[in-house]
Image (cartoon, rainbow, N blue to C red):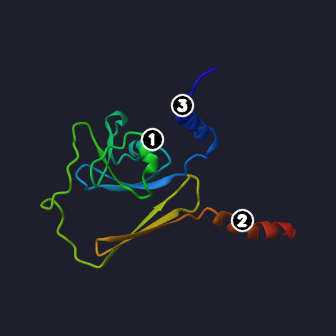
Amino acid sequence: MTCRSMSTVQTTISRHMLPLNRPRCFRVCTYRRMRRRSLTASSLDELLDSMVNARVFMMSYQFLTLVLEEDGTVVDSEEFFQSLPNSTPLMVLEKGEMFLPKSKFSEHPKKSGIAKVTFDLYKLQPKDFLCCLAIRATLYETYTLSYDFRFTRIKHILKMPSMVHNRKGH
């Protein structure tokens, strides 16, 4: 009889019984915060692959380090990656670069305003006809509201008229 710890059994069960993670949208920027890109991924490896394939960031997969943009915490495990909320701002670092917090002197001039709204369109699958839409509103640079619209069932609605048309014998 083999003795297993409860966490090993739980991990094994969750890998076999729970559904696969759905792709989520992430905001990824470069070291200097000049280039930003919305990328979707369901795992850490998939996100790193999409960064390399997007050709916006480094070409070499092995020299990339992914950190949280707000505090520089390294995203190095799948468990930590899965705990991140949707639209988490991330930063990709090349070999030799180290995280530096935003400096008040290096920031662009402060924009005054009440609200900032961002829209991110992304696809869950490359063959999807319709995209998903993530809307994020920041009020007074303090409060943030976000919502993620996923148009996954609309394909069935669009197919219904053609199905009815075919059943009538036209």
Q: How far across and down, in percent of the image, does residue 43 sit? A: 48, 44
Q: Where is residue 151, by image quadrant?
A: bottom right
Disc nearer the start of the sequence (2/3): 3
Position of 13 relative to 153 (above/below):
above
Disc nearer the start of the sequence (3/1): 3
Q: CA distance from mark 3 to mark 1?
A: 20 Å
Residue position marked by numbered label 1 in the rendering = 78
- Please give the name of the residue rendered at 39% of the width and 56% of the height, measured from the top-left corner: 88
Q: CA distance from mark 2 to mark 3?
A: 50 Å
Dot in front, 3 or 1: 3
Q: Secondary structure at mark 1?
A: helix
Quadrant where the C terminus is found in the figure: bottom right
Residue position marked by numbered label 3 in the rendering = 5
Inspect the image, locate mark 2, and give the three-letter code of the amino acid beneath it: Lys
Q: CA distance from mark 2 to mark 1?
A: 37 Å
The label on residue 159 is: 2
Q: Where is residue 164, by image quadrant?
A: bottom right
Q: Where is residue 25, by image quadrant?
A: bottom left
The reply to whether callout 2 and callout 1 are in contact (CB within 8 Å) is no
Disc nearer the start of the sequence (2/1): 1
Residue 32 visible: yes
Q: How far across and down, in percent of the image, does residue 52 sit? A: 39, 42
Q: How far across and down, in percent of the image, does residue 133 sit? A: 49, 65
Dot in front, 2 or 1: 1
66 relative position to 43: left or right? left
- Please give the name of the residue rendered at 54% of the width and 31% of the height, measured from the top-left corner: 5
Q: How far across and down, in percent of the image, does residue 110 sit? A: 19, 70
Inspect the image, locate mark 3, and give the three-letter code of the amino acid beneath it: Ser
